[in-house]
Amino acid sequence: MTIIFSAIFSLFIQAPVPVTTIDSLENSLASASGKQRIILLNELYKQYVNNDAAKALDYTTEALTLAEEIKDASGMSSSYNNIGVVYKNRGDLDKALENYIRALRIQEENKFVDALAYTYSNIGTIYSLKREYDKALQYFYKANDQFESIGHKLRIVGSLNNIGNVFEAQGYYDEALEYYLRSLAIYGEIEDNSKAFVPFNNIGNIYYNQGKYDDARAYYESSLDMERFNNDLNGQANALHNIGMVEKALQRYDKALEIFDEALSIVQETDNKRLLAIIYQSIAETYFSKGDMFLAYSFLRFHNQAKDSLYDQESSQRIAELESAYELEKKENQIKSLQMESQLQQLRISNDKIIITSGIVILVIGVGLTLVILNKYKQIRRNKRLLEKQNNKLEHQKLVIEEKNQNITESIDYAKSVQRSLLQFQVSPDKVERSFILYKPKDIVSGDFFWYADMGDVDIVAAVDCTGHGVAGAFMTVIGMSSLEQIINRDKIYEPGQILMQLNQQVRNALKQREKSETDHGMDVALCKIDHASKQVVFAGANRPLYYFQHGEFKEIKGTKRTIGEKAAPDEMLFENHTVDLKGDETFYLTSDGYADQFGGEKGKKFMVGRFKQLLHEIQGLTIADQRQKLNQTIKDWKNDNEQTDDILVIGFKP
């Protein structure tokens, strides 16, 4: 989603300056005074704002000081707006909003009609970034009305698109589409529309999310035509990728791969690592849908390498060993071994029969049949040589199987190290002391994973239980981790219910489970938003509950009865948010089902949820670290010599 905003305001608020280069501006500044000096200082701000924000801020702050001294309202308005842009670019939204509001008051007092429209738009952008959508709409509507009053169609296109973006962010696709189409209609009325934002992709995204793939493709192709006309290679690659996603959604996988390959060729020219990583991931998901796990694994590795280059944080490849292929290869090798054993046994039986027959012939027929016996002896020797050859072949096959099993095991061991590296999150020491994670994979790699993000005043924590375990389950964790990173860290969505809705959509798109399939892949999720500012914990669950203690009393909140990614559930089904007001003595627990499902005890039965809740009661008097130790020792004693049933994940935290 793209929010359009004006980064430079003095261009429209003050008279234009004939000089444009930094040298000429600085030369003019040396002899300038009064309002002319203010204008030049703000022009120099514009020259530096995108590459040296500190110097840009110095120039516009000096302009503000001078404007206040000589009571130049236009200069003050421009400078406050410019300062707001710098803070917005830094991510300090509150300070940006503070300066925009100061500019707005000056503009309203002095009836700077043209300038008001840009400031309304910028304030709307801040509220949109803060996800205060009602306020964002309020200011975007004002901006649009103001642009309409002055007949600025180029800006009307942008303001209508902004309104559409806000509706889309809230999931109101019909309303978003209405504004995108209005924006597109006005775009067609502008003679010189080369600088206008065209919402072809946004409209295509709406239709794609609604499952109207033909309409989505039409707008994506319009976007492609426009980007080719503008010779924008990144835009072309992005449009091609979107067209490929339509083909993938329609299960025309070969056509999708052909289009992705074209997009890949273009983006490799631009070295756009972000777009490159997205395209690699889409190719990997397409091969996964086709059932070609080797190529899915290969392109997932390329995705990780591109992502590593972009963020310089994660390791160079992701988990993508496929358990089904591994098991199939093992079974094929076992069948071959059994076939050779059968042949060997038949040869032994044949050999024994020949020996017995030879003895009988010697006793009954005597010396007269010596030639026959010699012939049989030659046959025995041939069988013996064949037997030795089969033994050698069997021994060689055994070595090959052992080598392949060793290679697969080493690969999975490496996958384990990669998966563990992906589960390393930056957590402040005080939060570490107030939390624990009990994480016990059933196999070398796990189908359970935990997720954490520190977003300032808000923390996001999740326990996720994917379909299956081992490498097959680990492949699902790749999709889950990538999706949560996109939703939380990049798209900045923090509401648990909305996170799960977006996660459900992305998982279903990845697995394409709207149609018939033999297996219902998915994941159960318990997810909390810890809002330190409002002193609240907001929970949403997909088939998983939240357990917590408040004033020593045990409480449970059940999640929505729906699995992320399941093909049977309706798209419109929402994940409900539940809010807990913090009193200062709470302890919260998120779990997968592995702990309660573990078989053991004296009768070899499951641990069960009721016994797990009772255990949580018993450990409330312990420190958070001792709670983890007690949980670990209890399940270890319960399991005893039994095989671990499933992956085990328990998260505990005190906000």
Image (spheres, helix red, strand yellow):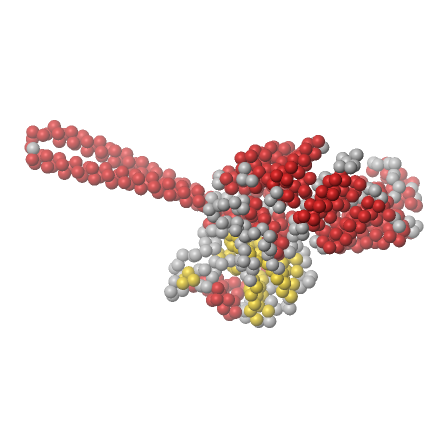
Q: For this view, does 329 lie left or right of residue 573?
A: left
Residue furthest to the top in view is 371
Residue sitting at 40 percent across and 64 percent down? Answer: 601
Q: Image quadrant of residue 151? A: top right
The residue at the point 57 percent across, 45 percent down is 509
One can see residue 592 in this view: yes
Residue 332 x %, y %: 37, 41
Question: Image point 13% across, 35% down: which residue?
Answer: 358
Quarter of the image that includes the C terminus:
bottom right
State which quadrant residue 203 falls in: top right
Give the number of marks.
Answer: 0
Q: Please give the name of the residue rendered at 72% of the width and 32% of the height, measured from the top-left corner.
A: 230
Give how far across and how far down residue 610 sits, in percent: 48, 66
**Which quarter of the figure has residue 325?**
top left
Please name whichever residue, 398 or 199, is drawn nearer the observer in this view of the structure.
199
**Camera-side residue of 214 and 76:** 214
Image quarter in which the N terminus is found: top right
Relative to 490, 608 lies left or right: left
Regarding residue 406, the answer to whether it shows in the image is: no
Residue in the foreground of this view, choosing between 29 and 326: 326
Locate residue 277, reporting x and y percent. 60, 41
Q: Is residue 594 above or below residue 293?
A: below
Residue 251 screen position, x and y as percent: 54, 40
